[in-house]
Amino acid sequence: MDKEQIVSQLMGMAGQYQIEISPETLGKIVNMSVFYVAEKGKCLKHIGDDTTKAGLVLNGILRCFYIDGNGNDITRGFSIPGTLCMDEGMFGYSESLSEWETLEETTLMVFSVEQIKHLIYEDDLLKNAYMLLLENALRYKIYRENGFLVENATERYIHFMKLYPEICANVKLYYIASYLGIAPEYLSRIRKNMKETKI
């Protein structure tokens, strides 16, 4: 894949997320990035690692998860094509708060957080895109908290399916259950009941 193809792909992703950005700016980002194909099951970042690099998913899926005091992993979220990953540095953290692993073969565009932030401050369209990113992150946080506070498990799963059908189709039930804060067996019962009642 050459630079023009990558810029074209990024323009398509930007349009999908209603982000206005120039091909010239995307070309600069491509020039400062490294492209990496990671095999399925690869852990790309560990808790406590530095956050000087972040990535954009070009294809594939990553899972971000915590480790609790008993050694259990708890899914924090997923990164799909067109979204950031390993991105704690973009939000001011100096160390990774979570583990990041690939759930399928994944292509990433990895860049320096410092370099991209410098470019953001110079480019108004990119600055607007960054503000949208921050707004979406806050909206996601509020949506997640709201789900745990006012929705039951079935409602959380239905909402998740509507927002992320590609994750439901390609990710293990165990990981989705962990994300929703329920046992995998309970999620299996929810899915069975939904099928029987044709929800």
Image (cartoon, rainbow, N blue to C red):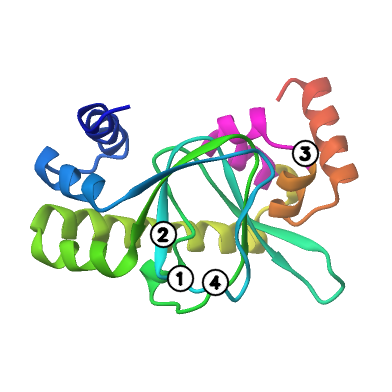
Amino acid beneath label 2: Ala
How far apart in space, not on screen, are marks 1 and 2 (Cα)? 7 Å
- Tag 3–tag 2 contact (CB < 8 Å): no
Amino acid beneath label 3: Leu
How far apart in space, not on screen, are marks 3 and 1 (Cα)? 29 Å
Find residue 31 and report its horizontal and vertical position in percent: 22, 47
What residue would you read off at disc 1? 51
First in sequence, mark 3 or 4: give its number.
Answer: 4
Q: Residue at x 41, y 59 (%)?
A: 54
Q: Residue at x 49, y 74 (%)?
A: 50
Q: Does the rendering let one see residue 20?
A: no
Q: Residue at x 59, y 34 (%)?
A: 105
From the viewer's side, name the closer residue of 26 and 72.
26
The secondary structure type at the circle numbered 1 is loop
- Tag 3–tag 4 contact (CB < 8 Å): no
First in sequence, mark 3 or 1: give its number.
Answer: 1
From the viewer's side, name the closer residue of 61 and 186.
61
Find residue 167 and report its horizontal and vertical position in percent: 60, 35
Residue 186, image quadrant: top right
How far apart in space, not on screen, are marks 1 and 4 (Cα)? 6 Å
What residue would you read off at disc 4? 96
First in sequence, mark 4 or 2: give its number.
Answer: 2
- Tag 1–tag 4 contact (CB < 8 Å): yes
What residue would you read off at disc 3? 173
How far apart in space, not on screen, are marks 3 and 4 (Cα)? 25 Å
Q: Is residue 35 left or right of residue 75?
A: left
Label 4 neighbourhood size at 10 Å, few (<14), some (14-19), many (20+)? some
Q: Nearer the viewer, mark 3 or mark 4?
A: 4
Q: Tell me, for residue 54, which label it has, or none.
A: 2
Amino acid beneath label 4: Ser
- Tag 1–tag 2 contact (CB < 8 Å): yes
Magenta residues, start to end: 155-173
